Image: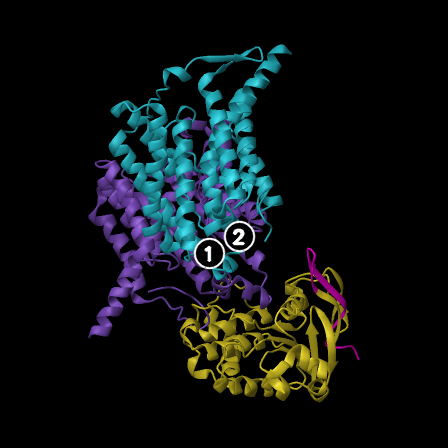
Chain colours: A cyan, B purple, C yellow
Amino acid sequence: MQDFLSSLVMVAFHGLAYGMILYLISVGLSVTMGLMGFVNLAHGVFAMAGGYMMLSAMSRLDVPFPLAIVIAFCAVALASMVLERFLYSRLYSAGELEQVLFTIGLIFMSVAVARLVYGPLPQPVHIPGYLKGQLHFLGRDFPTYRVFLIVFSVSLVALLWFGVERTRWGAMVRATVDYRAMAQSVGINTSRLFTLTFALGSGLAALGGALGAEIIAVEPTYPFEHLVFFLIVVAVGGLGSLRGPFVAALLIGVADTACKYWIPEFGAFFIYIATIAVLLLRPEGLFGKAT
Amino acid sequence: MTHAGGYIADARIRAAEWLPWVFAALCYFAAPSYLTLGSYILTMIIFALSLDLILGYGGIITLGHSAYFGTGAYVAGILALRLTGEPLLGLLAGTLGAGLLGLFTGLVILRTRGLALLMLTLAITSLCYEVANRATRLTGGADGLGGFSIRPILGLFSFDMFGKTAYLYCLVILFASWWLVRRLVYSPFGASLTGVRENNVRMHAIGAPVYQRRVVAYTISAALAGLAGALLTQTTQFVGLNVLGFELSGELIVMLVLGGVGRIYGAFVGPLVYLVAQDYLAKRFPEYWYFGIGAMLVLVVMFARGGILGIIDAGIARLRRGS
Amino acid sequence: MPAALETRRLCKSFGALMVADQISFRLESGARHALIGPNGAGKTTFVNMLTGRFSPTSGAILLGGEDVTALGQLARVKRGLARTFQINTLFRNVSVVDNVAFAVAEREGVARRMFRPAGSYHAVVDESMALLDTLGLAQDARAVVAGLPYGKQRLVEIAVALGLRPRVLLLDEPAAGVPTSESHRILDVLDALPKDMSILIIEHDMDLVFRFAQRITVLAQGAVFLEGTPAEIAADKRVREVYLGERHV
């Protein structure tokens, strides 16, 4: 019994850490898909880029950990802005197929570049000394880094939600998700709004990829391999919603950890079946707006 | 050269449409050492045709078409290992197995659209992959399924080590598939698929059972994919997990888009160009190969939505206007 | 004799928003009936309920005396109800004749056939061509819809509906977007429709309404405001205030 309780706590803890990373990565995808109606399969590329950015800044340039994270966020956000302006924006009015093809193309290119620059193997992760080791509380040991991960992500998410609820930018995003035509007609500069939101979403994905490098290994196949999970978070959570993907990411994080811990022989069965069930019952996702 | 179908289209087979077959026959004599690659290309053309039917003509975007290809491959493999190595029976079983899966999954997932549909196709493939990965006793799991032999076709033509029989076998099956797909595209059913793709709201308003049409098209396409999968199993005498992978679905889309979507022969040109180029480049320069594929997709989407055949069409049109 | 189309206390609300409020309405057999009302009066919602695109919150819809409230769009089309759309809803990248032929083929039950080429169904092709001819579109039959001027596309919109040989035809602003100089062509086409076809037209072009309709229903804020002959409607002061305003004194 004691054993079971202790494994329950560990599953919940690690599931939470994984879920938070999934959320950080996917929330931008949810917002951009809801906002711009763009099927961006290449979103994982930004997460991967963030991971590479941070790890190589730390290992090759000896940049301290906090600064490396800031660099990852800024660099990816900026790069995504350029991509959005020159490529993505041309396809907003195109069909789903074009968007899917274009973003698959981006994935292929990024996988190739990653392999050329960093080689095919996963990047080693260096956790700074002050985040190594275990924290002791509730009568148990928890890895310090993951505790930091959870605390940091939760504060980030709180900041993001606050931003969306309380700032002018957030109000514009919400209005545009709900009533695109109206938002345009009341003079919201949707094109600038799209660029900024896209950059923020990509930056968050980069943060997720960088912070989560210890959980989701940074390797060239990253954008393909984890695409299904990012998409599941968004589709199950509901497009354009902030809370939906949060719930979905935590559910998936915990469920996946639990499956791996207790019933490894079933792999990701449970998650796929649950995804199929949710999408059949609510095609718009758990928190999406019905159309 | 687009094959759009419809009520005023001329459905007769044009002279140029015999070219692929002449070319395929020439290859048999001219490139005997490439027949294995040739068989693979012919198989992938069937697979690409099946995708073209739902994606190009039906407008159903799927990232999971390998589920049906893989099902056909495994059904044919398991049948050969456990029951009989009779090839035509194997093809039939693979086709039916995949068709049934297509029918059941189609009935369920085609109620949705957009992202949900895309996700469902992806989730179903992932699920099939997991099943095949775990059901090691039946499928061999990650080691793959082998150790079966295929009996001579019709009891007459046995598979040889040079792949001659396999090549001709694939060619005959492709010819039959092409003929069927072509009939379908030009039929009223094909026209109504175009209608569904072009304007769903209008299709409902003229009293078309849209959902039913999509399910039927999806089932046929899945069955055809299963046929291709079974063919691959028989010609290679092996089934690996990758037949169910998302990568294969992705590659297939790339091939079809490269050739040209919704025009029958795009499904011929795409796999041919892609696989030949892959054979030359992929092993020598894998990174550049993937980069090239990615760049090609981006360029096609931005500038040449008709693929290679679209570019050729535009070229011909320009020449005609010029002269 | 039952009405060609009838609604009984039809209601529809989206959340707290009431867009149809107890609409009871009769379209007599062979009638030329117009539905008018200011923007946002709920006209298009009403049409969408009639065709089965939206289901009403309460109330009943009867087609030729039969209660079709629970039936889907498909079943209503099969029972002879066709519509046109306010905004062109056509197969844009397909030829004009195919647009019509798709409808004819559905009506004839040909569209699900898989083996013979579509072009070999001569009855479908000939009927579609003949229909286009009566609308003056014979010359454009082989052209792709997207390349036609807007006015002609509006005619194709009507042609597709006629391809279903409807008993009841709902025209949702057939002249919307058409320059006044060309709207007479639309009217000519409407005038030439078979007398036994029951037609409900929604239109903003008051000239067209008053020349075409025998009866007019005025809808305001989701409810029937008034119904009568064109003369009665034109004479009613309240209608002028509510709707016609200064446009039609």
Percent position of residue A193, x then y: 43, 50
Queried whether the magenta region covers residue B79, the answer comes back as: no
- State the quadrant of the C terminus of chain C: bottom right
Q: Magenta segment, principal secondary structure?
A: strand
Considering every residue shown, the one lying at the far front of the view is A167
Q: Name the side, left or right, on which C109 lies relative to B121.
A: right
Q: Name the side, left or right, on which A137 lies relative to A146.
A: right
Tell me the residue that label 2 is attached to: A175
Vertical comparison of B158 with B187: above or below = above
Give me the chain letter of mark 2: A
The three-letter amino acid code for the residue at tag 2 is Ala
Vertical comparison of A101 with C44: above or below = above
The reply to whether callout 2 and callout 1 are in contact (CB within 8 Å) is yes
- State the quadrant of the N terminus of chain C: bottom right
Tell me the residue that label 1 is attached to: A188
Q: Between residue B13 and residue C48, name the one nearer to us.
A: C48
Percent position of residue B201, x then y: 55, 63
Extent of the magenta region: C1-19
Percent position of residue B112, x then y: 56, 50
Percent position of residue C68, x then y: 73, 66
Q: Between residue A131 and residue B311, name the one nearer to us.
A: A131
Looking at the rendered structure, the number of numbered marks drawn on it comes to 2
The answer, for residue B231, to whether it is visible in the render is no
Cα separation, mark 2 vs mark 1, equals 9 Å
Instruction: Please tell me the numbered disc located at residue A274.
Output: none
Residue at image x 73%, y 73%?
C224
Q: Quadrant of residue B185?
A: bottom left
Near mark 2 (Cα within 10 A), the count class, few <14, some 14-19 or many ≥20, is some
Queried whether the magenta region covers residue C11, the answer comes back as: yes
